[in-house]
Image (cartoon, grey):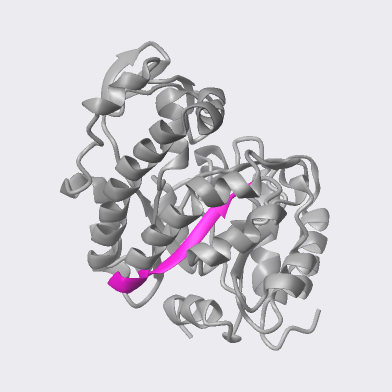
Amino acid sequence: MNSYERVMTSLKFEEPDRVPIAEFVIDRKVYTALMPEARTQYDFDVKMGMDVLQARAWYKIVSEQGSSFTDEWGIVYTRNVEAVPHPVKPAYSDLGFLKDFKVPDPDLPERLDTLPQLVADHKGGRAIAYALRAMFLWSANLVGLDNLLEYMYTEPRFVHDLFDTLVEAQTRLAVNAVRAGADIIVETDDVAFNTGPLMSPQMFDTFITPRLKRFADAVHEAGGYFLKHTDGNIMKLVDSFIAAGADGLQSIDPIAGMSMGEMKQKYGKKLSLWGNIDCGGLLTDGTPEDVERAVIDCIRQGAPGGGFVLMSSNSIPHSAKPENYQALLDAGRTYGTYPISV
């Protein structure tokens, strides 16, 4: 099988020739240590034979302030050693902003980032993913996470209106990506702490599940698969993800108590499971031998019957040892051949 066939077979809960391997974000320090000639993660992914290649929704920087910057949503971020910058200041403090608020135009061609290149070079040979947020984290960054969670109780109409505004635009962007050639839409709203969801399942089903279903339905209608990403402990929300139409779940975070074995037993024929090698303590502080054992255990639990993609429990951070990430890739190819025998 080629990479595309391998991933599509797994998404259909069938066994491919081997376990697909993917990684959505790899810190530059890690991939250049393993492949000095790689100018971008794209170069690394292609040359390393990754089964999934990913583009991400692109938004321009409108102003720079030293190590911080403001994007076109009006959100202030600070740069750090990690690949993904951290939001430090919400865009708005007055709920009245929504009356005149306009989501950055989802139909601009540049929103698709590197997707056209991926499609031109790899369509049908590699699975092509496109990552974007549906509504929750954009809302949290617009008004502040603590404020947003409070508004769900005190200003529910505002939250409903805000979510509707955002999900309508982001659904258009997701559909544009599928029509441009993306096979998989990765929705990247984190909705949990390590200890559990950021809100009750009831609140999630009131505010998010119906809108996430509209998002997923549109992706499916356009011909794409829908992969839900969130780290944290989301056991109380898995049924809601399924009700919303998710085809798969990433990252199944072991640091948050998420078990690949438990997820496979309960949901292995309802959700494709993408994960779940610990990207924190293990890849940062462990040894290649520790990583190999973790990969074997993960494959043993997640791979039988298909519906499994091997990757980290979130992303590959700056702190990860390059030799540990190489051990993950090597072990995946060594022990991931079907029929699984580890």
292 shown above or below 336: above
Residue 101 occupies quadrant: top left
Give percent across and percent down for residue 271. Answer: 59, 71
Q: Residue furthest left?
A: 108
Residue at image location 51% in from the left, 44% down from the top:
32
Q: Is residue 252 found left or right of 286 in the rendered image?
A: left
Left or right of 4 in this view: 19: right
Which one is nearer the viewer's eye here, 167 or 11?
Answer: 167
- Residue 252, image x and y in percent? 67, 56
Q: Is 308 or 149 nearer to us in this picture?
A: 149
The magenta region covers: 220-231
Residue 234, percent across and down? 67, 51
Q: Is residue 215 left or right of residue 168?
A: right
Relative to 330, is 160 above or below? above
Residue at the spot x=61%, y=86% of the render?
A: 15
| Magenta-span inclusion, residue 224 | yes
Is 178 within the magenta?
no
Q: Quadrant of the C terminus?
A: bottom right
Task: Count numbered badges in the picture.
Answer: 0
What residue sits 80% from the left and 67% below the top?
A: 297
